[in-house]
Structures are given as structure tokens and as C-alpha cells.
Amino acid sequence: MHKLNFVMTFAEENYLKAIFHLELESQGEVSTNAIAESMETKPSSVTDMVQKLAEKKMLVYKRYKGAQLTEKGRKIAADVIRKHRLWEVFLVEKLNFHWDEVHDIAEQLEHIKSEELINRLDDFLGNPDFDPHGDPIPNEQGVMKRTEKKLLSELKKNQIGICVGVKESSGEFLQYLDKKNISIGTRITVMGKEFFDGSMVIEVQNENFFISKTIADNLYVQTS
Amino acid sequence: MHKLNFVMTFAEENYLKAIFHLELESQGEVSTNAIAESMETKPSSVTDMVQKLAEKKMLVYKRYKGAQLTEKGRKIAADVIRKHRLWEVFLVEKLNFHWDEVHDIAEQLEHIKSEELINRLDDFLGNPDFDPHGDPIPNEQGVMKRTEKKLLSELKKNQIGICVGVKESSGEFLQYLDKKNISIGTRITVMGKEFFDGSMVIEVQNENFFISKTIADNLYVQTS
DNA sequence: TACAACTTTTAGATTAATCTAAATATATTT
DNA sequence: AAATATATTTAGATTAATCTAAAAGTTGTA
Ligand SMILES: [Mn+2]
Ligand SMILES: [Mn+2]
Ligand SMILES: [Mn+2]
Ligand SMILES: [Mn+2]
């Protein structure tokens, strides 16, 4: 049983994580520009790092073609995401943080290196499957639970959905949801849907109100 | 109310912490070599960093004379130590780590930046005054509880002490103590003391055994 | 007091991560 | 197929943290 043969820096881990997320959205290689945008850096910086990660066999890189994670790279990315989400659960469940306050702290905690720590934390939290934003937590093997979920914007008039997650999880969006009393587990009924712009009137806790398509596009629901 | 005006790097925080500890041991300025030794770096690296920290007004530095923390520097050092020790309590109390396993993980966690986090952690742990090794935890203001404690080696024959801390807290030493059933709170009776080399025979939980002066020099006890 | 031993600083390199500006490759239009 | 626009890479700097080797300062002792 051998542990970490190489130590990834914070920067390297952040790149792997970003590429992991981008691969989920778009199949095939991930472009330099896409990485640069998601990480708020310059494309030239991305090229440098991607070349270094390719040398370390964390991803396959072809000049002008983009990057694709190897098994090794994908595992490390999943580990970082596992840590991020477990720490978010800790912050919300144990330290009573609100779901819109935990992301930045988790961005730091996700880089703490200790397998033992994260596995004990996992147990301490009761081996949760999802984080406070409804995102699945990879297990020790890097595998995460898949669920049947759709965007609220996909529902038709009179359909009912249970909120199971958010696509965007910026503070502003989460705070908007709070104001409207929407959180994970909330039952949402589509009372009306505007053909023209996709806006909706929804019912939440016996109250009806209007939401734009942008909102509906960022809320995941489960239908029965 | 303003928060952090400047962000300290991990390296800078580690230097401040090391200097803080060294100032406790020896009054006055702390020498370049002493810092280098305690941080396992080269004196030339220390000079560079100490000059930078002086520019940032974290310490007062006179060439060839050494360094002395300012209030600002001392406060940041105390904060890092506060975080280190609170995380150690968390690891032992909540995640059931053993006291000899937590230091390295705390070395990483002590650099997580969030006042809110550390204050909530403090509450979650019940605002402990001491860490798992018996070291005092600075409060939000950087002040720590002082206790009457002496080294076991200072006790005379037939005196009784309660173990309240360790001076050394390396894994090897802590594991030695475990083998001898000594931990924080253990009652220790000096059954005999060798004039020649300071070694002792002590009684712990109805068992008598021999310890060297080195051991006695690294155990803090409280006498009634 | 003088010099040897030790301590500390300076000079010059190195590595990681980032940037700007310029060069090069690819894609999209005429 | 050019020409133009966009994407990507390379070249060259910069900053932080570290090192080695050499220079400079301090100290303690003969
Ligand atoms: Mn997050
Ligand atoms: Mn999340
Ligand atoms: Mn420690
Ligand atoms: Mn400790």
C-alpha cells in the first residue's frame, strides 16, 4: 500500500479540479480559453500549467487541441472535490454556517493533505452523499452518486418538483433563494409558464411568485 | 471595524510563529541562527524573510542583532497558534485522533484564513483553554491562560504531580508516554530520585518504573 | 589587542506561478 | 482561396521563497 508518490501544489490541484468540472459540461478536450475563463487567469498561464501537468501524466495535452484528464488526474481532481464538499457539509451541519457562506472557506480546506483526516471527517459527518448545495460527494474511490434531476426550467405547467440542488451557487443566487424560502427539499409547483421568455409563476409554501428563466435554469428539481 | 488589511503568506505566518515561540524561551531579540534552526532552513533565508517582515512592521530588526516581534506581529503569531491548537482539539475530541497524530495536520489547518470559522470552531469545541498536549490556547485577543506548572524533574522524592502538559511533543515522546500510561491528568509520584544523573523512579497507576532525566525534563506537572 | 571562530548578511541562482506582448496556428468569412 | 478574426503558444519579466558560496561583522580568548 503506497500513499502519495507526488505532492500536488494548490495551483495544480485547482487546475485539475477546474478541468474536471469543464469535462462534465463539454465532452472531449477542454480548451485553454475555457480553463482560463473558469479560473480567471490568462490563457498563457494555462498553457504553461497544462504543459507541466501533461509532463506529470495528469492529463493528455495536444498543442492547440486542448487537455483531457488521465485516470490519475481525474482521481486527484475527484479527491479535491470530495474534500471541498465534505468540508462544506461540516461547516453547515456542525458549525452552523449558512449555505451561502461556505464555499470560500472550503476552497482553502480542500487542499489540506491527509487521507486519514478526510476519511474520519466523512465518518464524523455520517458519510453524506450530497453537499449543502445538492452536489454529489465522491467516495474514497472517486465515484459519486448520480441522481435523476432536471432543471426547474424543464418542467411544464402544473408539474411539481422537489428542489435537490443548484447549478449556480454564488452567494447572490443562494441569498435570493433564501428570500423566496427555497432550499434543498423545498416543494415547487409550476403554476404558469410564459411561452415567450420561459419565465414562470411558481408556488412555494402556499405563496405564488414570478421567477425569470435565469432562475429556473439554475435550480435542480426531482419529479416523482 | 476593519478586517485583514494585508494577507500573510504561509511562509510569513510560519516565521512569525517560530519567532513567537523563541521569544518565550529567551528574552530579548531572537537570533537569525536560532530561527534558522527551529525552522530547518538556512540563516541566509531567514535574513531575507526577517527583512521583509521588518518592512511590513511585523517585527523590529537590527542587522546582526536579531528580531523582535511588534504588537502586530505578535498578534498574528498568536492567531496562528490559536488556530493550530484549536484544530488539534478538534482532531482529538471530534475525530478521535490520538494526541501523537495531530500536529502535522494542524500545521496545515493553522493557515486557513477565516475569523468566522475559527470563532465558530472555538464555540463548537466548548471554548477549550488547553490543547491535547496541555498547551494554552490564545483567545480572540491573543491572550492565553497561564498556569502554575513545573517540570517533573523539579520535584523531590515523595512529591506528587498531576501531568498537565508536555514540553516536547514529538510522536516518539508521546508514544513513549502512552506505553507508560501517562497522559494529561495522570497522577505521578516520585518514589526515588538519583542525585547523580537526575533519573527517577516514579509511580503511575500503582506501577513503579524508572525514567531518565530527559523524560522528566519534558513533562509538565502541577503540584497541590 | 589581535586573531580565530562563529554568526550574519549579501550576491547570485533556481523553481513555481503568474503576467504582457508578440508570434503562430486555426477557424470563419468573404 | 484569401483575408480576417479568434485561439493558442512562446518569449521575456516579475514576485516569492529558497539555496550555495563568498563577504562582512561580532565575540571570546590567547
Ligand atoms: Mn463550493
Ligand atoms: Mn458545494
Ligand atoms: Mn502541534
Ligand atoms: Mn499542541
Image (tube, coloured by chain):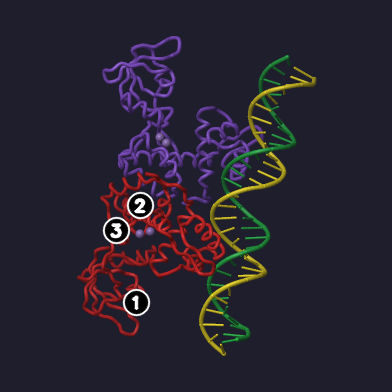
Chain colours: A purple, B red, C green, D yellow
Q: Secondary structure at mark 3?
A: loop
Q: Residue at x 35, y 44 (%)?
A: B116
Q: Is mark 1 within 8 Å of ligand 4?
A: no
Chain letter for mark 1: B
Chain letter for mark 3: B
Q: Tell me the residue that label 3 is attached to.
A: B130
Kindly identify the amino acid type of the residue bearing the numbered disc 3: Phe
Answer yes or no: is residue B102 visible. Answer: no
In the rendered structure, find residue B87 and report the number of the disc placed on it.
2
Q: Tell me the residue that label 1 is attached to.
A: B213
Chain letter for mark 2: B
Residue A187 is situated, as x and y percent measured from the top left of the image, at 30, 21
Q: Residues within 10 Å of mark 2 (few under 14, many from 20)?
A: many
| N-term-proximal mark, 1 vs 2 | 2
Kindly identify the amino acid type of the residue bearing the numbered disc 1: Lys
Between marks 1 and 2, how big is the CA–CA gap? 31 Å
Kindly identify the amino acid type of the residue bearing the numbered disc 2: Trp
